[in-house]
Image (cartoon, rainbow, N blue to C red):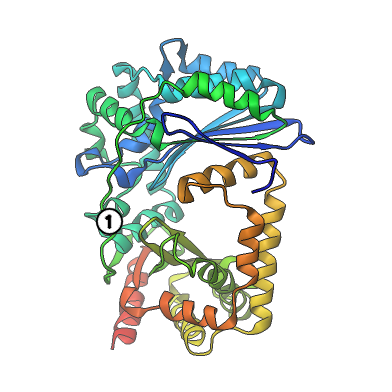
Amino acid sequence: MPSSVQIHRLTNGIRLATIPMPHMASVAMGIWAAAGSRHETETEHGMAHFVEHMLFKGTPTRSAEVISRHVERLGASIDGFTVEDHTGYQIKGPAEKFAPLFEILSDLYSHPCFDPVEIDAERQVILEEIAMIRDQPSQFLDDLISEATWGSAHPLGRTITGTEESLEHLNRASITAFHDRAYTGQHTVVAVAGNIRPEEVLETVESLLGQLPSGEVLNFQPAGPPHHQHHFHQDDNQEQAQFALSFRSIDRHHPSRHSHKLLSIILGENMSSRLFQTLREQLGLCYEVQSDLISFTDAGALQIYLALSPENLTKALDAISRILENLRQKGVKKIELEEAKSYSIGQNRISLESTTSQMIWAGESLLYFDDWIDPEETHARFAAVTLDEIGEAANVAFDPESLCTAVIGASEARTRLAKWLAKIDG
């Protein structure tokens, strides 16, 4: 561990990372709750996201307006987000304003009011958010491919925002109960990066969050076995079809995670990738195509996204099939692997020049691995990946038995997808 990075564990279980960056004028701070949509029960669908919204609606000493005005008066910005396995709250501002900014952040994290009037108002706000997502095909596609990959009955397959029906069942008692069990010491991670004094940060965090109860272990439903599922949403007003393929992949702790990440980069994460060069540059079938590797504690998925005219879908799918089969049969070239390594390491080093990225890296290290992960150790792991390991990753990642798809578009897109699926299954 670099001497500048310090990890502390408070008596109530809170994990704290401080990353001094004395050459910076800013400070980035984050508080994470290791609880997201996959920690919800069926009757709590949308709860983690709803709680995140409600934390910005006021505390006993601050209204929602006061929170916003106070943060911005200090020259800072504040944000929150909810994903499947955690929820985060972050502020970035002038380094000399750390103490008052963290006091605001810790106040909303640990002392939300959950005013019934605000709950009803925010319910309508989230309903508008749901409607907005459904009106944006690329975002709606994320929900459809998640459902196909994990199943509609599994928390990973349900929408993070909830639905119109599920939000109606959320009330102050259930919201408070979720917050009380999830926002506890052993599920809380704090990371602060910037022009800071670690001893001041530790003292501040202990004084403001040290009284959080340690809490009980949060349970979640393990991911089930892979299965074929294909979802279609007809939208005849769209000129393009939004399409996604998903293959079940490894979990985030798997020893081969670095080779799988490099495989995804070679496949479709940049402009040099096989998907981009073939589908866009050589065949001119689409404007946008990309791949992504999603990892959780117990499972993962490698997914491909593209948007194109329905008439080009069959050609695109055939081209994707050839690319994936080639990767499984022949692996990758040495130059491809070296370029992917250089890209991954270089982009990460560039990113970590900012206080926000350093804060996020530290926070996610503690969330996912319960310890600080030195970026250079990760870079070394990437550099050590071999051609044989990439070949093994391709055979694991592109198992046709785990293929799931989702498409949004006119009925023509569904017809072309069905014919392609029949051909590869046959």
- Report the side of 384 relative to 406 (left or right): right
x 62%, y 72%: residue: 384
Q: Is residue 285 visible?
A: yes
Q: Is residue 286 visible?
A: no
In front here: 380 or 111?
380
x 72%, y 31%: residue: 195
Residue 301: image location, x then y, percent? 41, 64
Residue 330: image location, x then y, percent? 53, 89
Above-or-below relation of 335 to 133: below
Report the residue marked by disc 1. Answer: 222
Above-or-below relation of 64 to 373: above
- Quadrant of res 143: bottom left
Task: Name the residue type under label 1.
Answer: Pro
Residue 95: image location, x then y, percent? 70, 26
x 44%, y 65%: residue: 254
Residue 40: image location, x then y, percent? 27, 42
In front here: 238 or 64?
64
